[in-house]
Image (cartoon, grey):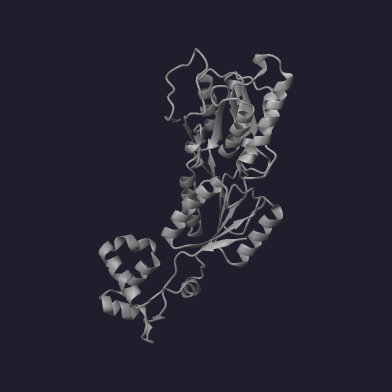
Amino acid sequence: MAKSKTIGTDTESRSGAGSGQTTSLKTLGEYLNLSPATISLVLNNAPGVRSIPQETRERVREAARKFDYRPSFYARSLRKGQTFSVGVLVPELSDGYAAQVLEGVEDVLVEEGYFYFTASHRRRKDLLEEYLRLLMDRSVEGFIAIDTPLEHELQKPVVAVAGHRKIQGVTNVVLDQRRAAELILEHLKQLGHRKIAFMRGGSHSSDADERWECLMAVARELKVSVRSEWQVQLELRVSTPELGYPPTVELLDRWKDLSKADDRFTALVCYNDIAAIGAIRALRERRLRVPEDVSIVGFDDIQAAAFQNPSLTTIRQPLRSMGATAAKILLRRIRAQGDDPDTVPVIPELMVRESTMFIGETVQGPVRQGKKMRP
């Protein structure tokens, strides 16, 4: 179900600690020799608070603790006609991709004094629609959708991370999938790989179709052969390495009917890092080595990618930064502070690690493990 994290509030009176008397902004102002407006800015962590010296901010917070003064969220909401809350939609809270994006969202909302509800819809349309309704009933001021395929317009500002559908009122924060495909295939081609297998994402994933189309387009341009027997589709809707295990087994089972070494791929491009980890397990069970027999490329650069054995060569999406960008855009839209474009592109990086290996004789330029290949 949905969970919430409390973040900022506003000002109303509270009883002084153990005194039975009411502490108000005016009382704190007289005690500190500061205006109630200054104290309100500090305790609300309002945008103008940065103009107040750090020493003064600390004095205000110390006095609030001394008098057990806590701002009233409800008073602030009633006074301004706002709830200072947003809804955040994710497929699964345990998913590494969503978790890293959510960290960036939280960074901004905490700083700006916003409360947020997080709902995990498990990629079920009925749950997604139910959560949207429940969050609207709680008067959230907007939504952030993380890898969540929205299908219709909402009556609130929406920012979608990895959203690709053009929907009225939705701003999409998306990775440049075309550039990511170029980085992957140029890297493998430089390493001498010409026989490359591809793992396509499931239809439930927001990035799946565009990522596949970009990979196929770049493969054609680089004259990389894309053979049907070297293509597999993800079927499971899980956020564990099991995701990539069955498709890799399927690929390897096809080898039984392939007697010629020329009919075996030397590299596998996985849909994401979680699938890549499952693929490596399947390869090892068939006594195949990574990268000596098959090079593996992942996608996302989740926190575990650099600590796998071997560490994953992968496309880095700046996930935390994407979450922060989404939250900033949403708050600007809520506050009607200028216009943002319908689509905000994000530039990828290729993180070259241990799961890919040079096998050819015609590499152009040095390729060193652990280095980033920037666009």
> With respect to residue 161, does 24 lie above or below?
below
| Residue 321 in view in this figure | yes
Residue furthest right in the image? 257
**Quadrant of residue 20 within the rendered picture:** bottom left
| Residue 342 in view in this figure | no
* Front in this rendered view, residue 64 or 287: 287
Q: Quadrant of the N terminus?
A: bottom right
Residue at point 54%, 45% (across, down): 97
Pinpoint residue 346: horizontal percent, then vertical percent.
49, 40
Residue furthest bottom in the image? 20
- For the image, the number of numbered tags is 0
Pinpoint residue 303: horizontal percent, then vertical percent.
49, 42
Pinpoint residue 71: horizontal percent, then vertical percent.
42, 73
Q: Is residue 42 left or right of residue 357?
A: left
Residue furthest top in the image? 361
**Quadrant of residue 248 within the rendered picture:** top right
* Front in this rendered view, residue 351 or 214: 351
* Front in this rendered view, residue 67 or 9: 67
Residue at point 28%, 69% (across, down): 59
> With respect to residue 139, does 212 lie above or below?
above
Residue at point 59%, 45% (across, down): 163
Q: Is residue 255 left or right of residue 328?
A: right
Pinpoint residue 270: horizontal percent, then vertical percent.
60, 32
**Quadrant of residue 245 within the rendered picture:** top right
